[in-house]
Image (cartoon, rainbow, N blue to C red):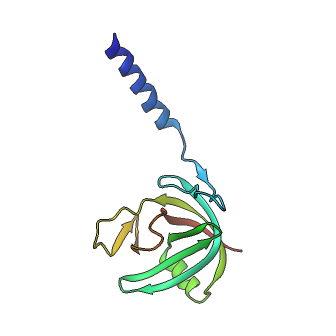
Amino acid sequence: MQIRAGLSVVLLLSLNSVVTAPAIAEPSFGGKPACVAGNICRAKGTLYIRRETVGIAAELKTGDGCYAIVLSPKDYKWLARRPGLRVSIIGRGYAQDCAEGVVSMQIGDRMMPTGLCQDRPAIYVTSLKEG
């Protein structure tokens, strides 16, 4: 009887996670960031593009810290001519748990250098707007 009860609980938890859509998280200014790996995240801040030894890095500075931003090549090219631009972004958060010595990582179809805002998820940007 205990085995059946345990199985039904596991089944309910599994079904619940399948039908639950990812949350859209807004950074909480002044507190712990709401953007977490696996969620869709929205953030506003000042975007900076930097050349690293392993490629181009993008960093979004917000009121509560920073996020490593994973952009498309087209976005990098457009933003390289606009340093310190204020932007709003939407994208999925990805964990940055890399082994020591790893200098870049691939997220989807994009590469990003590691070591930027590592205490927060990297955000794979799907929407970027000026302002």
Q: Position of residue 46 (x, y in %)?
A: 63, 77
Quadrant of the rendered structure where residue 130 is?
bottom right
Which residue appears at 46% of the width and 64% of the height? 119
Q: Residue furthest right?
A: 131
The quarter of the image holding the N terminus is top left
Instruction: Name the residue furthest top.
Output: 1
Q: Residue furthest bottom?
A: 81
Which part of the image, by quadrant, shows the C terminus?
bottom right
Vertical relation: 56 (above or below) 65: below
Q: Position of residue 5 (x, y in %)?
A: 39, 16
Q: Position of residue 6 (x, y in %)?
A: 37, 20
As rendered, which of 79 and 25 lies closer to the eye? 25
> Is 105 in front, or is 97?
97
Locate residue 66, reporting x and y percent. Answer: 55, 70
Task: Give the residue drawn at x 49%, y 63%.
Answer: 120
Q: Residue at x 49, y 85 (%)?
A: 50
Q: Is residue 109 above or below residue 22?
A: below
Q: How many marks?
A: 0
